[in-house]
Image (cartoon, rainbow, N blue to C red):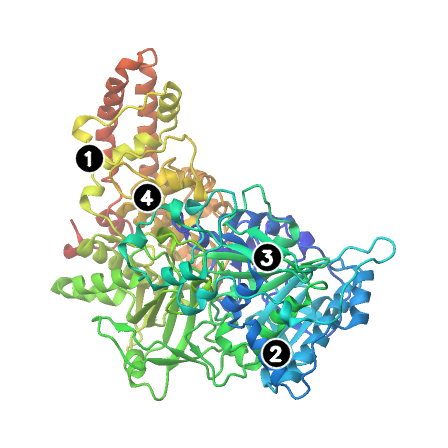
Amino acid sequence: MNEARAQPASDFGERQGVDYFHATSYDEEDTGIRGYRKRNALDQRVIMSAPANLPAQSHAVYTDRKITTQSSEDACIISWLASTSDDKITRDYPVVDFVYAVLGFTKEDLITKVAASASRTCLSLPRRPCEKYVEGSYQRGSRKGHSNICLENIFRDLLGQLTNITSSLMADRFSLVALDEHFVCGHLEKAYPDFLGSWAAEGQSRKLDAVAVCGALTKLAAQGASTKIFDTSIHLDRLPDLTYASSARGPSTYLASAARLAPAQPVPVPSERASQKRMKRKAGDADDAEEPETKRQKFIHVATSSHGRQITTCARNKLLNSSEKLRPSDIQIIKHVHDTASHGFRAYSIGFSIDDYTMTLWYMDRLGIVKSASFDFLEEPHFLALFLAAIVFARSQYLGFFPLLRFPSEHIDGTVLGNYRDVVLDLTGAEDMNSEVLEDVRFVVDITDERPLVPTHFAVGRATIVVPVKSHPTSQAAATVCGNTGTVVKISWPFKSRRAEDSYVRAVRTALEAQAPMKKYLKHLVDVKCTLTQSMEQLSLPRARMFGLTKDENLERVCRIIVMREYNTLKLVTSPEELKTIFVGAVRGHRAVYKATRVLHRDISVNNIMFYYEPDGSVVGVLCDWDLAKEVLDSHVTTEVITDDLLMSNLVFLTDVEKSGDVPAASEERADASAPAQSSNKPVIGSAAEDAGSVLGQERRYRTGTGPFMALDILTYGITPQHLYRHDLESFFWMLVWFVATFKPDENDFGWIHEWSLENLSEVGSKKSAALKKTTTVVQTIPNKGSKAYAAAFRPWIASMAITLMKPLLVAQETIESTVQDVWSLGGGVGPATKQQLTDMVWDAVYPQVEARERILTYESFMCSIGEVPEPELCD
């Protein structure tokens, strides 16, 4: 795998990091996808720049050679993780239950294996390494401490005892090493975990794609003489029973949610009889679905320590912004677990952290993080033995790899996981585009240098990955699905409540096929072969086995799998003429979809416009990735609705209304218009905008798109406006500008525009507005790092669109805002009783201006500006 040279941490802030980061689609509803990830030289899909205060992922490769230099983690990574992980963590899950739920291993499994071994030797800690660990210290990158080496020796000794219990090829190959003592290379080479568990042999490279577990260590130097007292014997009978024994007999509710928080007080442990009674109830029972929140019991940790005392800890879903804050060591392990979860073909990842002697287990999936109760690994080594044994003896489906993968044998290793050679993806039960269920649908993962796996940018959230596949030789259904074209599988984890992407594609294709003049535009729409949706229970993921976590239907995620034709990204275009054909085809396809179904894409970007070649060599542009699409009814995009959005977003209007405390209602003839409930006069960025998205009498709105390509209204409005067709057209314009300004045909890659890649969307809008206002064409106001040939070919298009469409649209917006301010200021002395009259005066003044503005950017005017004749069937 090609690896870009890592940027030194000391240079991280100075260079802004933008040429090392690439952004992804923005969706206020799904805050988990706001993460950013490191650019992969082979990644032909994610190409946008992102701000410096967001971390990259470490595509690190580790080999067994010592390194001599280290550096600390950049502070921005800690800040980013602390902010993006809030409300996604559950604490103090019982250790034995954690190991069972995540790794499918119980104390009975371990005791049985020990009893069945030939030696029947009791497990024990190695005394000398433990004593050296107590005496020593460890500071990341420092050569002064040696506790990491001692801890590696403890792990090595205990793993050796476990592998002697039974003959297992996977157990024999597994190792847990301290990476400070091994050479590290790859992206962000200073950001590797302290410990990495994998099946790589000595001298063999270790990649995050093939990791079973990662770990972080913090060890302070012992003060004075060591007084740590511990017993080296490991007493497995001290392991407590499962707190939630009933979880082994059926699925659980599993979603932690701020809306379901219990009072901060201990709650009773559910009795065995009560648990059995609950588990017998069907998941869909109405009385269970409507059970009052006050009756929902939260789990608590009840375990017996090695000293016989009872430990009772309320394990309610504490949030990161509560009184209990994450420590730096917590942030460190979360980063490492995140890196592991966002590499390769995974559904989740696991890790551990050790702070002096206190060990905690961590689990991360697409819903968030579960943190186990902590234990002293020297005083309570039976927990350590259980955890290591669970990893050593775990089957592949319990190690975080995607549950529908079928490995050639249970003895997986780094070689298999390097490119998933001979690994099968079983999608039996998928539905074709006619909603017919397919039997025996199996694909072979086909990852090569030319067809890389595209990993996710952020492990919590939609976490979309794209995997190249080919039909299995013995699967006729898969061969029929793939046909003669290349095939990829797109896997994502959207909210269950969000309409599925394949649902939109099915509806759109059906509508286009039903209208003779529209059939020819089907080639511009993504070709989906078959789809499969699975819940966490159906995939038997650990969270579904974690009994006691509350469930919020509004935040439940499902796995959506789409098998589709493989396309080329815009990085691979070969000429300006080819790009023109692709661009125009995508615009026409987008218009045909909206004309036939009123579905808007809402995420036009260089990522989502792709292409393929017909047998005769002609190129066809395709609009892909409809997962943020939405049907926008005509009644939701009337001039009245648009005017309401504009007025509610106007700064002066909102400021005066907020100060007066008298929010005027819409006039009687506008009673059905969507008046947003939020009245903040500042643009709302990120999850804070969720409230701003709510509208009276309609569903909640969310900003969607990819920052540099989003329309100015979406970027700058203080409330979330209704997404309009012209907003998508505007995104086509910004996408073309970005391409021309940054494309490097010799490298098949893009550069970046820093001013358009800021995290604050309002600032991005201001920068883009400023570019439009320059007397020269917009592309000339941007530091051009692209191709002169493409700039020359597209300058007439960009100049025409900027002069005839974009600038007039911006001027019209500024004129309307000025009118609002002028009319409102004229009524400054009017008392509260006449506020409604003043509101109507503003409305009457701006309504004709809004009508005129909405006639500027249309499909017809857009196509004419680039010299294309609008097709009659696509015109209004």
Disc ID at residue 373: 3
State which quadrant residue 302 falls in.
bottom right
In this image, 471 relative to 839: left or right? right
Q: Is residue 747 visible?
A: no
Of helix, strand and loop, which one carries label 4? loop
How crowded pointer 2 is (Cα within 10 Å; few <14, some 14-19, many 20+) is rated as many
Residue sitting nearer the eye, 545 or 656: 545
- Mark 2 or mark 4, whichever is nearer to me: 2
Tell me if label 4 and label 1 are in contact, CB under 8 Å.
Answer: no
Expressed as whole percent of the image width and height from the top left, the position of residue 502 reads 28, 64
What residue does disc 1 label?
672
Residue 358 lies, in percent from the top left, at 68, 58
Mark 1: amino acid: Asp
**Contact flag, marks 4 and 3 (Cβ < 8 Å):** no
Density class for disc 4 (Cα within 10 Å; few <14, some 14-19, many ≥20) is many
Give percent across and percent down for residue 416: 53, 81
